[in-house]
Amino acid sequence: MTRLIRSELLKLRTTNMWWIFLLTSLVFTGLAIWINIEQTDSELTNNYTAYPHGDPPPGMTEDQRAEFEANQRQFQQEEEARVAKAHAAGQLAKYAANIYTSGQFFGLLLVMLLAILVITNEFYHQTATATFLATPKRTRVIAAKLITASLAGVLFWLITTAISIGVGVLYFGAEGLTNSLGHWTAQQAVLLNLLVYVLWAVFGIGVGVLIRSQIGATITAAVLYTVGTWAAVLFLTLIHELVIKKDWVLESAVYIPPLASSHVVGGLATQLGDTDLPPRWAGALVLIVWAVGLGTIGTLITRKRDIA
């Protein structure tokens, strides 16, 4: 088995796509870090003190002036309460978790596409027959490819997470805030994100087995992941607003793999608003079920399929 894994790693290293995908992932991670820090900064900023609120316009009556000043005081109190809540340890940990898992959306897509290439390259370059003749037990070959793709997922996670945490720690330090690295909320998000990267690598192998065409598999996976994800959010939101105004409609988003991935690191709550979502481990469980299902189906198909 070790020889098979080494062989698969060699095949992966001798292609240009893995480092092209990795560089692309780093670009998206950098963009996501910037966006997440900007969002966090806006949440932590007191808009009453940060921006001039002005004096009452001239020509106001006494009643209008009193109402204007009352509104200003109310705005000041609301901002102070909001900022105090944002600076609480638990809320800071949520902001940190969001920053430390930056770039997850496109990172997972690229890991899945790389895993698809790991399996479809065999069919594209017509080396599948030779591979399975050299190793008649096809389950071992698929297992080696699953492990190889998973290791690639770990590499993507490790590099993007190291960059995200490094930049995040610098940001929180510059703001005089705790970096929340010792808080379980942030730790859980980072660790579960590792699991998510591995599981999406497994998804990629499963998709590559089901759709042997390299172009067909990559396009199908990319479209379903990107367009399908936002279409699912829009569909569930419309159903909730117009037809079935029950919380379970929005909560069902957790069963959709890309949204389950977002939920694992706490991002789905931001997308869906004030919704009572299941715990994060439920999103991880959904992904595990999907991964096991696709991996099992892919292995069974490969064992029975006429490769030639």
Image (tube, helix red, strand yellow):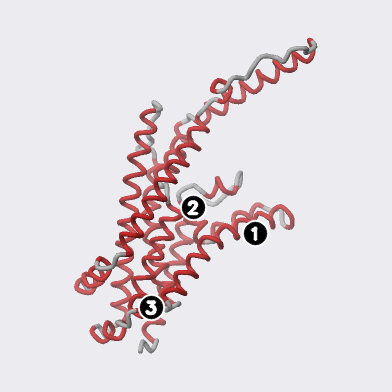
Identify which amino acid the numbered label 3 is placed on: Thr
Identify which amino acid the numbered label 2 is placed on: Ser
Q: Which residue is mark 2?
A: 262
Q: Which residue is mark 3?
A: 299
Q: CA distance from mark 3 to mark 1?
A: 33 Å
Q: Are marks 2 and 1 in contact (CB under 8 Å)?
A: no
For the C terminus, give its image quadrant: bottom left
**Coordinates of residue 204 in the picture (x, y in percent):** 41, 68
Relative to 116, is 80 above or below?
above
Identify which amino acid the numbered label 1 is placed on: Phe
Q: Secondary structure at mark 1?
A: helix
Q: Residue furthest left?
A: 3
Looking at the image, which residue is at 55% across and 20% down? 49
**Coordinates of residue 4 in the picture (x, y in percent):** 23, 74
Looking at the image, which residue is at 55% across and 59% down? 229
Q: Residues within 10 Å of mark 1 (few under 14, many from 20)?
A: some
Q: Residues within 10 Å of mark 3 (few under 14, many from 20)?
A: many
Horizontal placement of 186 versus 267: left or right?
left
Q: Which residue is mark 1?
A: 235
Relative to 284, is 165 above or below?
above
